[in-house]
Image: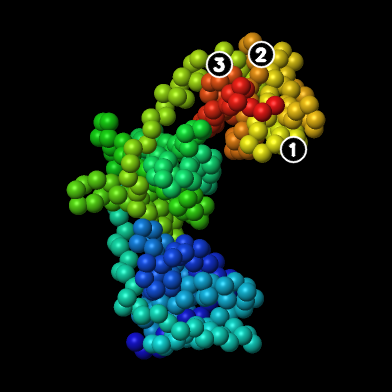
Amino acid sequence: MPTITITATAAVLSDQVGWAARLLPARPAIPVLAGLRLDITADRVRVTATDYKVWASADVDADTEGEGVAVLPGRLLAGLLAKLPPLQMVTITIAPDRARISCGPTRATLLTLPAEDYPTPPEPPPVVGRTEAADLSAAITQVAVAASTDPTLVSLTGVHTTLAEGGIVVCASDRYRVTRQSVAWEPVLDQEDGDEPVLLVPAATLSQAAKAMTGTVSIATATDDTGRLDQLSLSDDVRRLSTRLLDGDFPATTPFLERARQDARLRVSVEAAELAGAVDRVRLFAAADTPIRIAINDEGLVVRAGDEGDAGSEEVPAKVDGEGLQVAFNAPFLLTALANARSERVQMAMSEADRPVLLTPDADGDGYQYLVMPIRLGSASA
C-alpha cells in the first residue's frame, strides 16, 4: 500500500472517530476488531467499527492524498484525537506498517493492524422509511428504560419495534414495567394490508444509534437466507449503524396496557416535578429494597417511607378522581416514569393497590405509556 495522508481538524476527526470507537467490542473475537477500519477515498474517510453483530460507520470530510484501507488501534486513536486542540489541523500519514500523527507540536506513531484480516463491511440494506432523528431519539430514550439488563432474558433486553403504517411503535418490558411510545415516519413503499414488520432490536444498541443521528434518519431492514428479518440499519448523512436482531418471543403487552386503562377506578393528576421531588427526599428514609408508600385521599397524596425509628413523609397536592387507596412503589421505577413522561403533569390510573398502575402525560397529546407493577404492601417492610 502506498503512503496515504489524511488532513482535517482535530474536532472533525475526534467527533466521528470517537463515536465509532465507543462501539468497539470489549473482548474482540479476533485482534483486528480492536481497530478502526479507515476507508480512504478522495476527500473522504469512512471510519468503521464492528463486533460482527453491530456495524458502525461514520464519514469524515478531509483532505486526502492517496486511496486505500488501513486499520489503526481504535481506542488509542480516539483517545489521542480527543486530547488535541479541537481547531488544530491534524495530519495522519499512513504507511504499510505504521501511522504517524502530527498536530502542532504533538507527534505520535501507531502501529497498523492487518487490514486484510478485517471483515468486509456489508452492503447497506434497502431503505423502508424515514423519520426525524429528534423524534426517534426521544421515543427510544423513553421506552428503553424498561428493557431488561438480564442476559438470560434475551428477548426482554430488546425493544419491540413495529413498523406500522401509522407510525413506528416501540415497546419494552422487564416483567415489572412496560413502556410504549410511537413515532411518526414516512414509509418508502406502500405496505400491504396487515403487513407490519416487527423487529426485536437490542435496546442498548438502538439507544446508541438513535442518539447518534441528526436530521432525517433512514430506516433499512434486511432478511436472512430464509426471508426472515434479521437486521436493522439506521443512518443519517454521516453515520450508519446496523445491528443484528434478537431471537425470541416478546410478550404481548398491549392487553396489559388496555386493561390498566379500562379497569382504572382511580385517576390522579399531579405535577411530575413536585411528586418526583417528594419521592426523592422521602426515599432517603427507606432501607435498601424497601418501597416508598403513597396514600391517596381526596386532597392529594402523602408520600411516606421509614419505620418507627427514622421516617419521612411529604404531602403533595393532586387532583383525585375516585376512591383513595394506598400503594407502594419501587422508588427508582417511579422516578424513571416521572422523568420520562416529559410533561408538567402526569396522570396515574389504577384499580387496586396490587394491580398495575398506568402513568401517562396528562392531557398533552403525547402517546407515552409507562405501566409499573406496584409492590404488595404485605411484602413491604414498613
Dividing the picture into quadrants, the one containing residue 152 is top left
Q: Which residue corresponds to mark 2?
A: 324
> Distance of mark 3 from mark 2, alpha carbons?
10 Å
Q: Residues within 10 Å of mark 3 (few under 14, many from 20)?
A: many
Q: Is residue 290 left or right of residue 19?
A: right
Badge 3 or badge 2: first in the primary sequence: 2
Query: Can you see residue 18?
Result: yes
Q: In this view, does 199 lie to the left or right of 310?
A: left
What's the residue type where badge 2 is placed?
A: Gly
Q: Which residue corresponds to mark 3?
A: 351
What's the residue type where badge 1 is placed?
A: Leu
Q: What residue lies at 39% left-to-right and 63% top-to-bottom?
A: 51
> Distance of mark 1 from mark 3, alpha carbons?
28 Å
Badge 1 or badge 3: first in the primary sequence: 1
Foreground label between 1 and 2: 1
User: In the image, residue 38 lies at what x, y percent?
Assistant: 41, 74
User: In the image, residue 342 lies at what x, y percent?
Assistant: 61, 36
Badge 1 or badge 2: first in the primary sequence: 1
Q: Is residue 160 left or right of residue 378?
A: left
User: In the image, residue 76 lies at what x, y percent?
Assistant: 53, 75
Q: What residue lies at 35% left-to-right and 78% top-to-bottom?
A: 115
Q: Which residue corresponds to mark 1?
A: 284
Q: What residue lies at 78% left-to-right and 26% top-to-bottom?
A: 308
